[in-house]
Image: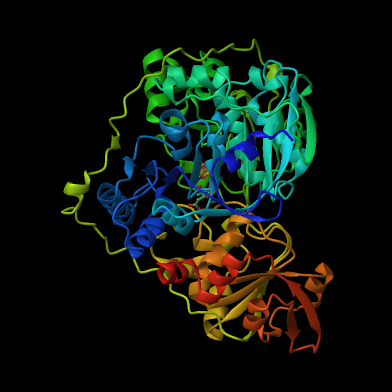
Amino acid sequence: MGMTIAQKLIKSHLVSGDMTAGHEVGLKIDQTLTQDATGTMAYLELEAMDIDRVKTELSVAYIDHNTLQTGFENADDHRFIQSVAYKRGVYFSRPGNGICHQVHLERFGKPGKTLIGSDSHTPTGGGIGMLAMGAGGLDVAVAMGGGTYYITMPKIVKVNLTGKLSPWVAAKDVILEVLRIMTVKGGVGKIIEYSGEGVSTLSVPERATITNMGAELGATTSVFPSDEVTKAFLKAQGREEDWIELKADEDAVYDEVIDIDLSALAPLAAQPHMPDRVKSVSEIGKIKVDQVCIGSCTNSSLLDMMKVAAILKGRTVCPSVSLSIAPGSKQVLNMIAQNGALSDMIDAGARILESACGPCIGMGQSPNSKGISLRTFNRNFEGRSGTADAGIYLVSPEVAAASALTGYLTDPRDLSEFPEITLPEEFIINDNMVVVPASPDEAKDVEVMYGPNIKPFPTSEPMAEDITAKAVLIVGDDITTDHIMPAGAKILPYRSNIPYLSQFCFGVCDKTFPERIKAEGKGIIIGGANYGQGSSREHAALVPLYLGVKAVITKSFARIHCANLINAGIIPLNFVNPDDYDKITQGDELSLEGIKSAIISSSPAVLKNLTTGESYELKYDLSDRQKDIILAGGLLNYTKKSM
Ligand code: MIC
Ligand code: SF4
């Protein structure tokens, strides 16, 4: 039987397990990336594992999230990461060099390789035929140390693209359409593989927009073939030798097929507060817009910037709109500076931001109260922008730029002539913002520099036989890690200070949560479906661990967060009967009697509600390896033990 691209990538990196959907497979990881918001923790974990030098083909540490530097904290963290990177053999992309996913695609990613990154949008690399996945920091640290990365063998969904995008319709509209069809839960346990004659009509940056935002489907990753288009892109990046061809076999079998006719798509937008609340721009109508932000790892490529500049050229941003633009990398910024596109943006009144995540993670540019902000980003979760009552719409750069001019949500097809942009045959290549690590000899004398903001991460105990604790918090469906552990300018600088972060845990849902659980000393969280979707931040597991969360019981989990809970030694459990969720009231005294023995003997777990006297059947989907991790009290304990 023929194989899909994803199956070929998995097979060529398979260390353990069998490739049947639902079974655990262990993969050899060729490349890793980290960013600074998750990186401090990942490198603290690497240091705790006592590994001299990373064992991957390539590991890169990027600084792109925490670049606001409102106090000493960020700069200290950057220095810490830079010193560990230099010592341990990791390339260091300095602040200003750009957003991790954009830079990695341009300068480092290679078709046919595996990549894990401590950021949920790592699947951007799927745009050039990598098996690229988001993971918790600890999983990335283990991979840097040469350890295997484990996933549940996903089902493979084929998205069959036919036709060609019409003028003013963008790659963003393709992924918004996929989100409309599949929803934010639809990709869990799946790899989305793009195929069909429409693929060759899409450039690499367009493919990368699509695989990037596949993260919002909850998918393990997304992948495009590596073809002549990929080759031309790598050649323009001076990396033609990194190209290999990668395509699915003619007789490859998929678990699911979705057909999308590119020529039939129209400009779309995701409405507040979920990336799958998608409607066409014309259906939503001419709502007034206060702010437009262009950039983020989804839409900050040279192609995106050139389109935006062409739309803005010779015009003026509407007086009631604030337009900010963050080009994705130093390469992109430098190229638009040299070819004059930057000048067109500045001339029109755009506020140019540095090449970093910026407003996407609430680092500045929070909208006004009840403000409507159009963003080319990938997430519009409640509160993420920094303004609790703002309404964020996710759109293409074309819709964003057109709307910035008119002051209301605008279908760019109403605007004027479509700017035909072709990618250059050569990009400006200058990797002078990437610091090459010390040689093993030099490395011995390199000192790792810890700042006062870096606090030890919480440790966990081997699992107890019984867990008895209150249902300290009950939350609904689609809870994101931005709900569990918010980011933003005020909190993000403390990503290496778990005790400080803990005061903001679940702040979006219930500000009293940290105080209440501290008073109890421990607790159990009850959640709905798709609990923990969104970011890969392991802080959403480490902070609850620090506060005393002993178990999380939900209708279902998102992949990366579930792995992070296991890594932290917190047991993730699901209701066998989802209706039991409704039978628990916040404050009920719950008991998981004999949970440890149940896990050891693989017997069903039972949750007793000591307040009502009821019992509910629970299930857990843990491989033997994951059981051992939970029993040991987390991956770090487990790794130390097995080393
Ligand atoms: C995000 O987009 O939410 C982030 C910030 O990039 C996160 C990582 C983090 O929380 O640091 C992600 O997507 O994984
Ligand atoms: Fe940065 Fe936003 Fe991309 Fe996350 S989604 S990596 S915050 S640009």
Visible residue check, residue 549: yes
| On screen, residue 525 above or below 485 | below
Q: Residue at x 36, y 61 (%)?
A: 44
The picture places residue 643, in percent across and down from the top left corner, at 39, 67
The picture places residue 9, in percent across and down from the top left corner, at 58, 38
Judged left or right of residue 420, residue 456 is: left
Please count the marks in the image.
0
User: Which quarter shows the N terminus?
Assistant: top right
The picture places residue 306, in percent across and down from the top left corner, at 51, 18
Quarter of the rendering containing residue 327:
top left
Quarter of the rendering containing residue 374:
top right
Colour setting: rainbow
Quarter of the rendering containing residue 557:
bottom right
- In the displayed image of the protein, which residue is found farthest to the front? 1
Judged left or right of residue 451, residue 456 is: right
The picture places residue 434, in percent across and down from the top left corner, at 31, 36
| On screen, residue 381 above or below 612 | above
Front residue of this view, candidates 506 and 41 = 41
Judged left or right of residue 599, residue 32 is: left
Front residue of this view, candidates 384 and 462 = 462
Visible residue check, residue 365: no
Front residue of this view, candidates 435 and 70 = 435
